[in-house]
Amino acid sequence: MKKRKIVIIGAGVAGLSAALQAVSEGGEVVLVSSQPSERAQSVMAEGGINAAMDTKNENDSPEEHYKDTINAACGLADPNAVWNMTQAAPDIIRWLMDLGVQFNRSGFDEVDLRNFGGQKKKRTVFAQSDTGKQLTTALIDAVRKEEAAGNVKRLSHHSFQTLLLQGNVCLGCLIKDEYSSTVTELHSDAVIIASGGMHGLFGNTTGSLFNTGEVTAKLFRLGIPIANSEMIQYHPTTIECGGKRMLITEAVRAEGGKLFSLKNGKPYYFMQERYPELGDLTPRDITAREIWKERQNSEVFLDMTDIPDKVIAEKLSGIAADCMLYLHKDIRKEPVPVSPGIHYFMGGILVDEYHRTQINGLYAAGECCSQYHGANRLGGNSLLGAIYGGRIAAKYACSDECNIQKGQPIKADISDDSVTSDIQRLNQIMQNTLGVVRNEETLQKGLREIKEMSGSLALLGRAIIESAIARRESRGAHYREDYPLRNDRDYLKTTVARFDGDNIRILFENVPKRR
């Protein structure tokens, strides 16, 4: 039986997981990325990965993990997909341990767990404050073994250009060697997009600027819809560093770090007073808004001075080192000023429960797609969603049969290279328009400005702004001060943006029902 050829665009956690799964399904893999895996954004993930391992004897379960994820998502995540992910999470942790990931342990053979925002139980498995680096390293080693065995061909320094299409069927893609500028046709049985979030649209984020968003922009221009793109997560605690945002992981607050502002010259621990149940570990969307409000009158600080030195050494050494290196601050002795910064894109390419797009043979996984997080992502669910999503995409890419007709595939139009004439101008428009708090005036102003720009990135940015305008309510990461209430009657639905070649259309589609 002929092996199915699977092309994967992106070599971070989602892409690497998809590659390993595809090989296990008998597939032949071509792994395409503009950068080597060692430079993927996945390496930057700090806090951990969620799974109901219950090593703290808190009666945790995948069902509890499911409930917390759905609650944080404010009703916009596919419940069937979330259920499957949370059920699979413990086995994923055991699989990662078998690959060699060195998670922190609380006993001889039990992984340690920490609290994370929006979760009442300790559920986040971690490797100090460098979990993403540990996971990515283990996955890279596993994929290299498959490369040596001839099951995976890796094409680094190559960029996605467009799809090879035959009607509504994807038959591969065009890629360009960024060293030689040679464009190559890759014919395949399926293409999996794992290109990461749309950080390049905004510029000043905690994410890698190699995640330009251009792949998503090119696909959107071809008519592939995006969903919930207005749901942009601001991490509550970031700092300005070298023209972008540096993250202070939520793990710091899980280990006892406290947020405070100054009130009459004295520390005011506003999160603990306003949200006594979860305090500083209240979900990220709420915490980011509270910090934004406080910063209208006072600087906000993260106080880590009460965290024991032993905890910092064993669990937070990476953060301590970063703060000393980039801020010249010893977190054991002085607080650090923080503010919200763009961190994660809950929205992206529209996929179903099996990570299929609306083009047969085209799949998407990881931060580039809209799937598990709805209107707000739980900390610790991004690495889980990327690994699980990559595996599911690969499983179905290797088993789905497309109705392919005879004839040559058509190269989708690449006359627009998706790069605007002024990326800095585009970044500024997006930052100014889609802040922690939004309103009709700022959204319409941003829309007028972005309509003056050309290119696929600008088109994608326009779709995000129009999605935010259309959702006249506040839900999760999308907060409209002119519509401050959640409106389930009209907006307990997925925002879907489509481009028909001339116009962008914004529709609201029902969230799938739990089976």
Image: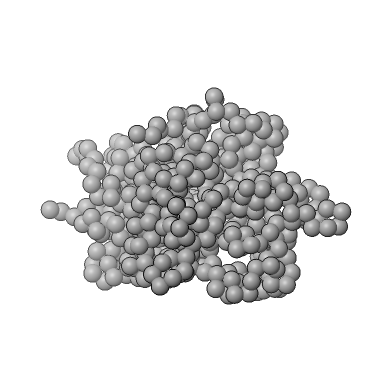
As displayed, is residue 469 above or below residue 290? above
Q: Is residue 437 visible?
A: yes
- Residue at coordinates 56% horizontally, 35% vertically from top-left? 467
Q: Quadrant of residue 102?
A: bottom left
Q: Position of residue 120 (x, y in %)?
A: 54, 50
Left or right: where does residue 330 sit relative to residue 353? right
Left or right: where does residue 17 sit relative to residue 199? left
- Residue at coordinates 61% horizontally, 50% vertically from top-left? 278
Q: Quadrant of residue 79?
A: top left
Outermost residue, right side: 264
Outermost residue, top side: 489
- Residue at coordinates 44% horizontally, 70% vertically from top-left? 107
Q: Position of residue 490 (x, y in %)?
A: 54, 25
Q: Position of residue 341 (x, y in %)?
A: 64, 53
Left or right: where does residue 169 sit relative to residue 346? left
Q: How is the image coloured?
A: one colour
Q: Is residue 318 visible?
A: no
Left or right: where does residue 340 sit relative to residue 500? right
In this rendering, the count of numbered labels is 0
Q: Give whichever of 87, 469 is nearer the camera.
A: 87
Q: Give whichever of 472, 485 is nearer the camera.
A: 485
Q: Give whichever of 21, 128 is nearer the camera.
A: 128
- Residue at coordinates 55% horizontally, 28% vertically from top-left? 488
Q: Position of residue 172 (x, y in %)?
A: 30, 49
